[in-house]
Amino acid sequence: MKTVVGVSASINFEVNEFYANSFISTAYTDSIIRADGIPLIFPICNNENVVKKMVESVDGVLLSGGSDIHPFLFNEEPIKEIGTISQERDFLDFKVLQYAVEMKKPVLGICRGHQVINVFFSGNIYQDISSQTSSQIKHAQSAHTNLATHKINIKKDSFLYDIFGDSAEINSFHHQAIKDVADKFDVIATSNDGIIEAIEYKGDEFIVGTQWHPEKMTESNEKMQEIFNRFVEKCKNSG
């Protein structure tokens, strides 16, 4: 039987403020399909029981990128540089992660999803890298999505080290980042300015976050695709 991976959807209001749309980039679903998995999109939903049933129906969960996390969730007031926030998206992602953790299902978080994992486990984030750090690296690139624009350093004996070795070249589309990593996680990759680019759960469960978007690079980069191959394999063996 094929391995099913639930993917959290983003939300927008294309028509007007009263009509919300759930959507997901096909780069996520294509990467899962290439890994011999079946993607199942989790739509925006405010029903806790329905979210629980959705998580029960899959073998693992991918928390996708999207809007900024509400600062109230890590006990801060919003600064003026914060971007769009969504109560609906926050509810979905945090509930999906809660149930995935309770059910011991593998979790891969990408960009926003990487930050959601850290905040859920009581870490925090920079609301805006440019105004809150001294970083001189461009983390919100204007280049094509599949183009690597800066490098990362990878920790030995980590999930990513087995794929890339001690360094990798990545794309970058974010203005927020993890500030203080949650106690239950190891930092397994950083950029040269010290920004946290990946985290990994210290326990036996597979919970990994990447700040960059590997799904945007998988079509032409075998190592980026290997992240999804190994994630889907973890999902397959989790039952």
Image (cartoon, grey):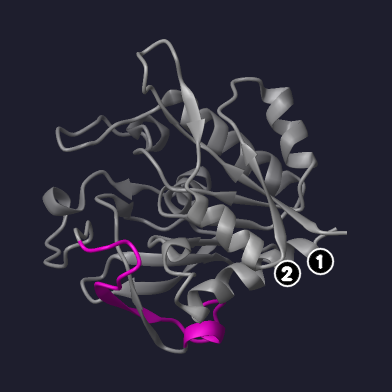
Secondary structure under the numbered disc 1 in the rendered image: loop
Q: Would you say the residues marked 2 and 1 are in contact, meaning their CB atoms lie under 8 Å apart?
A: yes
Q: In which quarter of the image is residue 200?
A: bottom right
**Residue depicted at 49% across the width and 74% down the height:** 224
Residue nearest the observer in this picture, 13 or 179: 13
Q: In which quarter of the image is the N terminus?
A: bottom right
Residue 237: give its label.
1
**Image quadrant occupied by the C terminus:** bottom right
Res. 34 image quadrant: bottom right
Q: Residue 88 carries which label?
A: none
Measure how far apart labels 2 and 1 are at the Cα level.
Answer: 6 Å
Q: Residue furthest top?
A: 18
In the picture, measured across the screen, residue 176 lies left or right of residue 220, that is left
Q: Is mark 2 on a helix, strand or loop?
A: helix
Q: Is residue 62 above or below residue 34?
A: above
Q: Give the range drawn in magenta.
A: 143-164
* Mark 2 lies on residue: 233
Residue at the image point whose x is 26% and y is 43% from the top: 127
Of residues 213 and 72, the one drawn nearer to the viewer in this rendering = 213
* Residue type, numbered disc 1: Asn
Whether residue 233 is in magenta: the answer is no
Residue 113 place in picture, x, y as percent: 48, 49
Amino acid type, residue under disc 2 in the picture: Glu
Instruction: Relative to 61, say whether 87 is above or below.
Output: above
Whole-percent x and y of residue 93?
Answer: 54, 38
The x and y percentages for residue 62 are: 59, 52
* Neighbours of disc 2 within 10 Å: few (<14), some (14-19), many (20+): some
Work out whether residue 5 can be spotted. yes
Q: Is 125 on the left-hand or right-hand side of 81? A: right
* Residue 181 in which image quadrant: bottom left
- Residue 156 in the image: state x and y as whole percent: 49, 86
